[in-house]
Amino acid sequence: MNNNTLDVIFLGHDDARHARLVEALSHLGFSVRRCHDLADVYDRYSRRPSPLIILEAPLQDIHNAAVRLRAIDRSLGIVAIAPFGAEENRIRTLLCGADACLPPEVTGLELAAVLQALVRRAVGLDLSDPAAEPAPEEPLQETWRLANKGWTLVSPAGHSLGLTTGERDFLTRLVKAPDRKISRDAFHPDGAEDADGAITRRRFVDVMISRLRRKAAAHHMTLPIRAVHGWGYMFAADIALELDPRETGEEGRQEGREAWRRDAVDANAPSY
């Protein structure tokens, strides 16, 4: 299974609304690479393929891109954002290869829910099933560390993992919580207050934890994060939160910082 399940290439306008959508997706655990023209989309995809692509552009550009990208990868998840107007415009967009058509006023939570549905289709995971957790390999009684002001997770064996904004926020809250336990409801990425929104938020936390586990496995780490059935998560090991990277002075510090920079670039996706 690929470890980039929640990577997203996002073609959109260089404006505040696009930035808010990118920020919302990043906070929910997606790694977003921002693009402002189709040439950049094709270039980024060729250099590092992504399973999810969002296209917000004139309809003709969306149609051309959807046809080209679908020909490259039939399993790709493609979301189109545009003022479609007539029904025939949405139909044509879907026939060109898009999986979903959304209006420009779409919220970050709705956009993330659509992407999450495409992820479920692609990987077939039940992300809320505690039985799906990997068997522990790390020594659970030894101390883990959140270093580099919380941006790097270091295992007892010395392996380092750079964290995205959402992952850092979640782990920091988890570590600071009593008994290192936190409910899904304690994590409110988009501020929705209705019952459906609460269910969606819990699901997003499950998605983020699932991605974090897979990313950790690629770095030879098995996270001692355990699901508390029907409630939330706990960190089933000792862990120390180091706020100042200068306090540790470890040889693996540079590796941790470089890992964080790679993830931070994807998570925050600066404009070009």
Image (cartoon, rainbow, N blue to C red):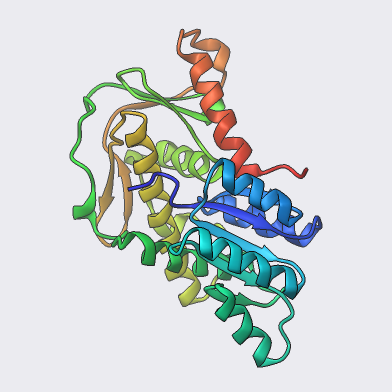
- Name the side, left or right, on which 170 lies relative to 8: left
User: Residue at the location (18% across, 40% down)?
Assistant: 135
Is residue 190 visible in the rendered image? The answer is no
Seen from the viewer's position, the closer of residues 115 and 241 is 115
Seen from the viewer's position, the closer of residues 84 and 116 is 84
Quadrant, the C terminus: top right
Residue 260 position by quadrant: top right
User: Residue at the location (66% across, 91% down)?
Assistant: 88
Residue 95 position by quadrant: bottom right
- Name the side, left or right, on which 84 lies relative to 179: right
Residue 268 position by quadrant: top right
Is residue 144 visible in the rendered image? The answer is yes
- Name the side, left or right, on which 265 lies relative to 48: right
Q: Residue 244: x percent and y percent? A: 57, 18
User: Residue at the location (76% across, 45% down)?
Assistant: 271
- Name the side, left or right, on which 158 lies relative to 18: left
**Which residue is at the far right?**
15
Seen from the viewer's position, the closer of residues 237 and 97 is 97
Q: Residue 219: x percent and y percent? A: 36, 29
Position above or below: 10 against 143: below
Q: Residue 28: x percent and y percent? A: 52, 54
User: Residue at the location (60% across, 63% down)?
Assistant: 68
Q: Residue 254: x percent and y percent? A: 53, 15
